[in-house]
Image: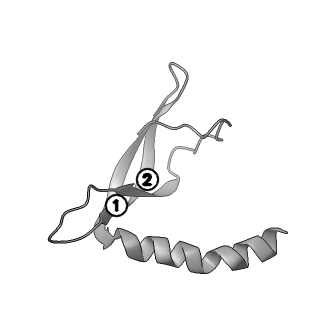
Amino acid sequence: MLWRGDGTPLPLPSIGQILTVEIELPANHGFGQKCIHCQGTVIRIATEGDCPNIALQVNYMDFRSFHDRIRAMESMEPVMNSWMA
């Protein structure tokens, strides 16, 4: 996967580090909005070019409701804001 931040550089993970990634999938009228929830171990980092490429060995993958993820983040937002203030 391509490793980049929104306007700020991200620190690179290390080889062997476990990452969790969620990938938003296109909406399907029969199933609703879903995402792929993956956990993987960093096995390779290629640093050519502006943004490094990170290779993961997938440990597990699950399909989840995207809207449940949004609701969970929205419910945490007031807590995060009060903690960060």
Do callouts 1 and 2 mark residues in contact (Cβ within 8 Å)?
Answer: yes
Q: Which residue is mark 1?
A: 59
- Of residues 69 and 28, the one nearer the viewer is 28
43 shown above or below 51: below
In the image, farthest residue toward the front: 29
Q: What whole-number distance in Å separates the C-alpha atoms at marks 1 and 2?
A: 7 Å
Q: Residue at x 70, y 78 (%)?
A: 78
Return the x and y of residue 51 as percentages of the image width and height: 53, 28
Decide if residue 19 is on the left or right side of residue 6.
Answer: left
Please determine whether, in this image, residue 1 is positioned above or below residue 35: above
Q: Secondary structure at mark 1?
A: strand
The C terminus, quarter of image: bottom right
Amino acid, disc 1 = Asn
The residue depicted at 46 percent of the width and 47 percent of the height is 42
How dense is the environment of label 2, judged by Cα within 10 Å: few (below 14), some, or many (20 and up)? some
Residue 10 image position (x, y, % from top left): 64, 41
**What number of labels is visible?**
2
Judge by depth and name the residue closer to the eye, 42 or 27. Answer: 27
Residue at the far top in the pictured view: 49
As shown in the figure, which amino acid type bears the numbered disc 2?
Answer: Thr
Q: Residue at x 50, y 19 (%)?
A: 48
| Left or right of residue 85: residue 56 | left
Quarter where residue 29 is shown: bottom left
Q: Nearer the viewer, residue 17 or 34?
A: 34
> Would residue 82 be found to the left or right of residue 26 on screen?
right
- How far across and how far down the image is residue 65, in percent? 32, 73
Quadrant of res 43: top left
- Residue at horizontal 51 percent and vertical 30 percent from the top: 52
Q: Of the numbered discs in the image, which one, if any, rests on residue 41? A: 2
| The N terminus: image quadrant | top left
